[in-house]
Image (cartoon, helix red, strand yellow):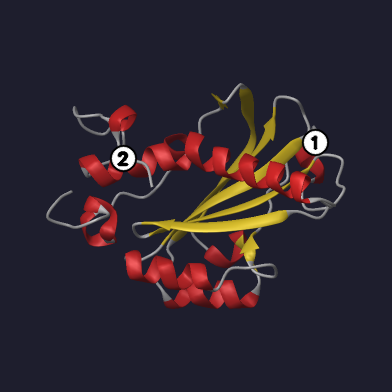
Amino acid sequence: MSKYGKWGYITSRATDASPLTVNELYPAQFEISGLSFERTTDRADTTCNDALFGSKLQNAAKAYGCNQVVRASYVSSDQKMMGTIGVVNLTNSNDAAKAGDASGSTDFVTPLNGKTGPTKNISQGTGVVQAEFKGHYLILIWAEFTNLKAPTSDSQRNQLEQFSANLISGSANIALSNRMVNGHPQGSASASASASATKS
C-alpha cells in the first residue's frame, strides 16, 4: 500500500505524531445497518492507567509506550445496548499487538460513565470485551445491555459483539484509516479521503 507497509503512515508514531482527539475519533452520532449510535460522554487521558482496567494491561501499555487513551461511551438508538470504546496510542504496530495480547476478561478499557441516561450505569452489569490493533493503536471495547443483565445465549453475545464491531467501524476506524492513508488527521490538511480509506 505504501513504503511504510500494511499500516501505511500509522505503522509507527514516528510517522504519525499528531495526538488523537475526541472529535477526530468519535462522532456525536452515526448510523450503521439501520441502528444509530449516540455518544453520551468522552474523555482523553494522558495517564494511561486511568483509562485501563487490570494490572496486566496497564503494565503492557506502559512497557509499549502508551502516551494517551481516548475514550467515548455510546448508546444504541433503541436504548438496548451501550459500550465504551477506547483507543490506546502506542509506539509502533508491534507494540500495539503485544499490548493487545494483554487484554482479556480481567484487563480491558475502563468503562466511561455518562452523567445521565443508560450509560450512567455502564460497568454495573456484565459485558463483553473486544480488542483489535490498527497500526500503532490498540482499540478496546466494553459492551453490555442497558438492562445490566449478562448475555445468557449465543444470540445475545452475538448482539453485543456486533454492536462492538459497528461501534469501531462507525467511529475510530474511520479516523485511523484516514491517518493510515493520508498521513495526518482528517481536516488538518487539504487532502481528506476518509470515505475511501481502507478498513481493517
The image shows residue 29, relative to residue 52, as above or below, that is above
Label 1, on which residue? Answer: 118
Across and down, in percent, residue 82 comes to: 71, 40
Q: Tally the marks.
A: 2
**Helix or strand or loop: what does disc 1 sit on?**
helix
List the single residue furthest toward the front: 154
For image coordinates 36% across by 50% down, the residue present is 19
Mark 2 vs mark 1, foreground winner is 2
Amino acid on which the number 2 mark rests in the picture: Thr
**Helix or strand or loop: what does disc 2 sit on?**
loop
List the single residue furthest toward the top: 34
Q: Earlier in the sequence, mark 2 or mark 1?
A: 1
Mark 2, other Cα within 10 Å: few <14 / some 14–19 / many ≥20: some
Across and down, in percent, residue 59 comes to: 54, 78
The front one of 48 and 31 is 31
For image coordinates 43% across by 42% down, the residue present is 173
| Quadrant position of residue 159 | top right
Across and down, in percent, residue 133 comes to: 43, 58
Q: Which mark is residue 198?
A: 2
| Quadrant position of residue 187 | top left
Amino acid on which the number 1 mark rests in the picture: Pro
Relative side of 95 to 197, left or right? right
For image coordinates 30% across by 38% down, the residue present is 178
Relative side of 81 to 62, left or right? right
Relative side of 184 to 139, left or right? left
For image coordinates 80% across by 32% down, the residue present is 117
Mark 1, other Cα within 10 Å: few <14 / some 14–19 / many ≥20: many
CB atoms of marks 2 and 1 within 8 Å:
no
